[in-house]
Image: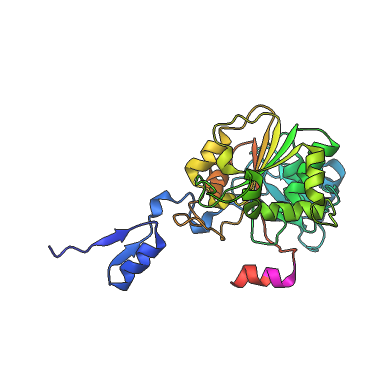
Amino acid sequence: SGREVTLVSKDMLMRIKADAIGLIAEDFLSERAVNEDAIYNGFKELYVNEDEINLFFQTGELDLQQQVAEALHPNEFIILKNRTNPSHSAIGMVRNQEGLLQKCRFQNEQAWGIRPRNAQQVMALELLLRRDIPLVTIAGKAGTGKTLLALAAGLMQIEDFGFYKKLLVARPVVPMGKDIGYLPGEKEEKLRPWMQPIYDNLEYLFDVKKPGELDEILSGIGSIQVEALTYIRGRSIPEQLILIDEAQNLTKHEVKTILTRIGEGSKIVLLGDPHQIDHPYLDEYNNGLIHVVEKFKDQKLSGHVKLVKGERSPLAQLAADFL
């Protein structure tokens, strides 16, 4: 008919095949939760006078209504920097959309022996330890400390403070919703390869020295449960701290299913790297993690921060940046 035909698909392999035979192919952009230039990081830098930083340290508050032109979000972090001496700085959290900045409660805190190493980790720990923020999202590349910091904060709140009855740690068995299959052994043995990154972090936090020691510790404590997301559906989860790792591999529907399971007195933390997606039909702009960040950024019950500095090793940082 002489009309130009364009194939629109979320399947990258399909688009590559179409391009190879000369057919115009495009991504399905309308499902994107956010545009590339509008991703919310959860923090801003603001240059102010030295007197204002000193006032913030003295009173623990600062009115930013006249300082910031763009809109502020509840629980957004502001890094105050001295105009004449940028190394003189302070970190605060916006408590309302009118621009009242308050000092972080846990800036000098450490969790289960883990102390924040950079400004964004300070922000993440603040969100993790605040009981008045029941939904926390933390994004960052591999090696930025997302999982370790979240687990440390979780152990502190469960074992030291008794804020929650149980720490439930889960990650999707990619693709989510599929059964683990006919592997030998009990459910825990089948899950172990998928959950190994969680166990690695727990071994570090518990300073495990020999094989099998972590299993003994976890069975003795009884308040820590490592689970696949496949088994969370249909449950109601009250008075628990839930950590969802690799949340970038969740669809919008799956993340909604999880959030609607959260019961009274519970807190949920979504962790993930939007640049490291294994799901064939998701990308860094339409996955469940980014969807939650975008939809909840104006809600007082939610907080988000993007970790930007790798702390695993210089090599891991280079690999995350360039590969």
Horizontally, residue 314 falls left or right of residue 26, namely right
Quadrant where the N terminus lies?
bottom left
Marker count (numbered):
0
* Of residues 92 and 302, the one drawn nearer to the viewer in this rendering: 302
Magenta highlight on residue 314: yes
* Of residues 203 and 294, the one drawn nearer to the viewer in this rendering: 203
Horizontally, residue 310 falls left or right of residue 283, namely right
Image coords of residue 6 (percent x, y)? 27, 61
Magenta highlight on residue 205: no
Please, is residue 289 above or below residue 162 in the view?
below
- Chief SS of the magenta region: helix
Residue at image position (31%, 67%) is: 18
Q: Is residue 14 visible?
A: yes
Please, is residue 255 above or below residue 261 in the view?
below
Image coords of residue 81 (percent x, y)? 76, 57
Please, is residue 206 above or below residue 157 in the view?
below
Residue 204 image-quadrant placement? bottom right
Please, is residue 238 above or below residue 213 in the view?
above
Q: Which region shows up in magenta?
A: 313-317
Residue at image position (17%, 62%) is: 3
